[in-house]
Amino acid sequence: MILDRRLPVAEIAGPRSSNLAGGSGYELPVLRLPGSWRDDPVIRAGGDPVRLRDLCTTQHGKDIISAFFDAWLRPSRTSQPTIRIIINYSRRADTNRDHALTRRPRQPQSTGLHRVLERYNSSPVESLVLTQIIWTHIVGVMRVLAAPSPWAGPLPEAAPSADVAIYQLPTGTYETRAAFAVSGGSFRDKRQFAATAILVQHPKGDLLIDAGFGSDVAAHLAALPRIQRAPYQAAKTVSQQLDVSGYDRSRLLGVLVTHAHWDHVSGLGDLRVPIWINPGERHYAAEDPGGKVFRIVSAGREIHEYGFGGPPCLGFPSSFDVHGDGSVVVVPAGGHTPGSVVVFATVPSGKRYAFIGDLTWQLDGIRRRVERPWLMRKLADSDPAQVRQALLRVIALAGLMQIVPAHDVHAHDGIPDLPARLAPAPAPEDAKRPDR
């Protein structure tokens, strides 16, 4: 972890406990700056060295980061933990000072990161150094991507029947600071991340895109590493909203997940319908820690695996036309997870939507052409370069359709809510699932 080219971090001594996520006897990290800024950075946690370049690419490195941010950014309601920081105020090794910093019990105010750190009883110099650490490595320097040429090719043919309709089903939100959501975001700016499912009605059968929060969302959050938990507000689940509207569940072909992370699949546990997922994402969900909640909610559920046998679509290399009429087309957009997808949908009016999952968490990524902060890319994305490529493809389409990042509340504006009493729809024309 490098502060900048002149000021490397020499050591992070992590908790002695083998469980770096916390627990009883949790010992917080020690952050040290080197005796000479000319020294190469060396990172250790619990005595085990971690190469600098592996800090964000190995599980042990991610555990170190989790422990560090648990200590600094997660207030403890039951204790007042202490963080020991050794800071070199000059280039002379004998001028190091060792400080015991005890967190004050009150919640820091959102008055800027430097002020927040001063509330932890650190000196101005210490808080300035820690500000540098956090801004440089969590938030990162904002880099605007080169503007792609607007899409100049023809739009894919789409012939949705008059019965095709799209509805949004908001299931709640959770809170994240913009500084952790998008490069260049403000630490003062608290964003409400949407957990919203999309229902696409079609004469051949309806499909949900993602499932939002479920009735067991609290347990699902508790199953996550501490650094991934956030304050949340739950609304009615997808299952509850379907029941209130009088929806005929026999019409529902299944839930197509844009990817297998918890905030997209929590609601699957309440829906007794097939889960639509491609082989790459299914493998990720079965093996990766990020698929833990998916494994819980998908146990015993029917899995409908689909592939991408269709032609290139809007700059993406292949596609899957769900109904064969261009109204719902899925394209591979791996990078956030290996099997992440974008879903293009077209309604009878001719309006088009791109449900892009987590290619970017906020519309800022589209409008300002920026990625996630550096550390978030390292922690959250399986292949940041792939995400960047897919993001640029979507940015090129922004003038042609409504781009909907899954977690941007305002990106869903204009998509109607599911009516309180949904008008009865005719039975699906063909009960057989669409072919791949």
Image: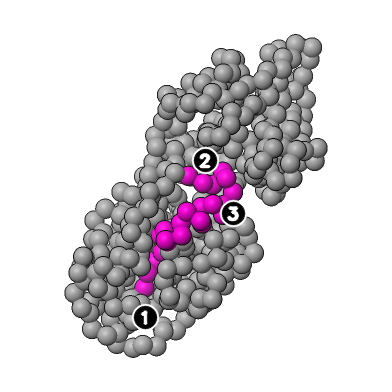
The image quarter in which residue 160 lies: bottom left
Residue 65, given in percent of the width and then of the height, sits at 64, 40
- Upstream in sequence: badge 3 or badge 1: 1
As for residue 237 lying within the magenta part, the answer is no
- SS at mark 2 in the image: loop
Residue linked to disc 1: 324
Q: Residue at x 72, y 36 (%)?
A: 14
Mark 2 / mark 3, whichever is N-terminal: 2
User: What's the residue type where badge 1 is placed?
Assistant: Gly
> Which class describes the residues within 10 Å of circle 2: few (<14), some (14-19), or many (20+)?
many
Q: CA distance from mark 3 to mark 1?
A: 31 Å
Amino acid at dot 2: Pro
Q: Identify which residue is drawn at 30% across, 48% down.
A: 410
Asked if one can make out residue 367 in the rendered structure from this viewpoint, the answer is yes
How far, Cα to Cα, is label 2 from label 1? 38 Å
Residue 292 drawn above or below residue 322: above
Q: Write the residue at 59% across / 54% down.
A: 383
Label ID, residue 383 = 3
> Tag on residue 373?
2
Q: Position of residue 201 (x, y in %)?
A: 29, 73
Tell me where residue 225 appears, x and y as whole percent: 59, 49
The span picked out in magenta is 207-230
Point 43% across, 26% down: residue: 109
Tell me the CA gap for discs 2 and 3: 14 Å
Q: Is 122 drawn above or below residue 141 in the view shown?
A: above
Residue 261 position, x and y percent, is: 51, 58
Query: Does the image show residue 359?
Result: no
